[in-house]
Amino acid sequence: MKSDYAKRGYHYAKSYGVGKLYFKARERLERNSLEKDYQDWLFAGRPSAREKELQRGHRFPYSPLISVVVPLYRTPEMFLREMVESVLGQTYGNLELCLADGSGDDSLESVLSGYMNQDSRIRYRRLPENLGISGNTNAALGMATGEYVALLDHDDVLEEHALFEVAELLQSDPRPELIYTDEDKLSPDSGTFFQPHFKPDYNPELLRSNNYICHFLVVKRELTERVGGFRGEFDGAQDYDFVLRCVEQTEKIGHIPQILYHWRCSEGSTAGDAQNKSYAAEAGRRALEAHLKRCGEDARVDCMENAGFYRIHYTLCSVPKVCIVLLGAPDIGKLRKFLKAISKRRTYTNFEMLMLLDMPKKNKTVLNFIKEYRQIPIKVVYCTGACNKSVTFTSLAEKLESEYLLFLDSRIGTTGADYMELLLGNAQRKGVGAVGGRVYDSSLRLRYGARIIGLNGQAGVAFEGLKAGYTGYFHKAVLQQNYHALSGQAMMVRRDNFLKVGGFSEDVEERMRDVDLCLKLERLGLRNVYEPGAVFILQKGRAPRRRNVRPAAQFSRKWKEFLKEPDGYYNPNLSLKDTDFRIGEIY
């Protein structure tokens, strides 16, 4: 095992450099320390013997046959037995186990014959030859007679109550056509559970960054037939291609936030390291490109450093005018650095700036500088000490010609390349509301970015304090994805949509107006997008002291019903006291 890690580390360093390997190794060690109590958490949350007996006797009003489909290929006997027994031992009994065997001999059939003699729910077919992972899976799908099919790998294991939880969700209205659960990894000897993946509810942008849905996947059989099953040209990422085609065909998607599937880490498996099957990353990229094309999106897909993760660059369909709105009134020194930052790596030129300043007598130096500055058109509006700047921005937006507004913290001193194109590429897409980047402080720790509802009170910043170079839990700090809210210190929004929702609201506390704006955009039917490729770094200077701030009472009253539910783009098993996606309290 140690030599295997060394080999992986060598290849990673060769591809991406020693520095990247250092960050990857340190982050993995830190993650392991956060997960040290995970097994206790898992065992404590399992149903008791009494609860499992009650589940076995429970009768649902809707009790569909669920076909568990498994493609077999020279499966080690121990793994095969554990897989079969985990299915046959389910507390929900209306199932069938469909096994398509492409091993090319009778080695697995001899093991399975004893199970088939004891349980009529097993359907077994020995294939004349190995048809590949997609072909073998399609053969297993062809044996299924259930209304729903559940996809299981030949060496993985289900929790005993997995199908019961699925059946319970199927009682809801509307009834889901695609269901997925949380999952973890299982050691080869079945003795250790680790790397729990606590997933968000359906997150379309995240799915375009990585197949986070993965396991355990249950799909209405009619939907599998509608999309045409699995396609061999995407072997290695056949499940990603399949999921992408499914979500194109249905909006009835359900998520069960429980660890119900254990993905075995065995030699050569992608569970242990996606680099083991590097061809899979390229197959996933092609699957994603095909998905974007079907959806009418003009974009380029790049593979990220971590295999199986992708970054999409959406092509600008036009070159609209953008107004950069400065948040805060900078002194002459900060203003010079800000303007230098946004001009230094400027690849997009059609923009102007808007600044709010106190009365001229207090800002003569700044005004004189702006009068002589010719590189960027800057509009200045005077604001008396009593004015509400957020409300003033809203009224000014009505008079601007710019199609998009980009709100930026005036303390920014460094920007990443192509930040404007990255934000605008997302903001111009149909159905998108606000688009937010990530902002680091001068010590290169994440300060602003995506906001999680309920975190640290009301809406904390995801991964706040994370060091630059670190990617966070399942690399989520650097993945495009949906969130309910984004930090206003680096946020772009279409001006028309900003005005449609009334801009920044006066009826909530100033520190919550960016969150309020994002929620209003969602209520309009738009989705907000976190674009971590747009990176900004604040100038050096004393950071505001962090104080215990009282809950925003006005915001809480306005969004009372929304705040009752946990943030669907997070996960109820994760801590609301920590920003690093660590596990919440043990049951």
Image (tube, rainbow, N blue to C red):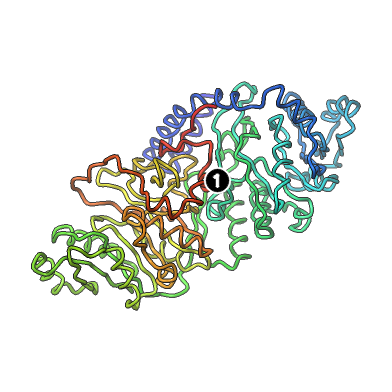
Q: Position of residue 99 (x, y in %)?
A: 81, 38
The picture places residue 532, in percent across and down from the top left corner, at: 41, 53
In this orientation, which residue lies closer to the viewer: 471 or 384?
A: 384
What residue is rendered at 53% in x and 36% in y? 573
Residue in front for this viewpoint, 314 or 162: 162
Instruction: Look at the image and tell me whether residue 177 can be seen.
Output: no
At a point 23% along the width and 67% down the height, the residue shown is 355
| Residue 361 found in image quarter | bottom left
Density class for disc 1 (Cα within 10 Å; few <14, some 14-19, many ≥20) is many
User: Residue 232 vs residue 431: left or right?
Assistant: right
Q: Position of residue 17 (x, y in %)?
A: 39, 41
**Along the line of sight, the residue nearer the viewer: 274 or 544:** 544
| Vertical order, 362 against 106 (above or below) | below
Tally of marks: 1
Name the quadrant of the N terminus.
Answer: top right
Q: Position of residue 21 (x, y in %)?
A: 41, 37
Query: What quarter of the picture does the C terminus occupy?
Result: top right
- Where disc 1 sits, the SS reads loop
Horizontally, residue 387 falls left or right of residue 492, namely left
Q: Quadrant of residue 369?
A: bottom left
| Residue bearing mark 1 | 200
| Residue 474 in sight here | yes
Please tell me which residue is depicted at 43% across the width and 59% down the height of the picture. 518
| Residue depicted at 81% across the width and 48% down the height | 147
Task: Tell me the kind of residue under disc 1.
Answer: Pro
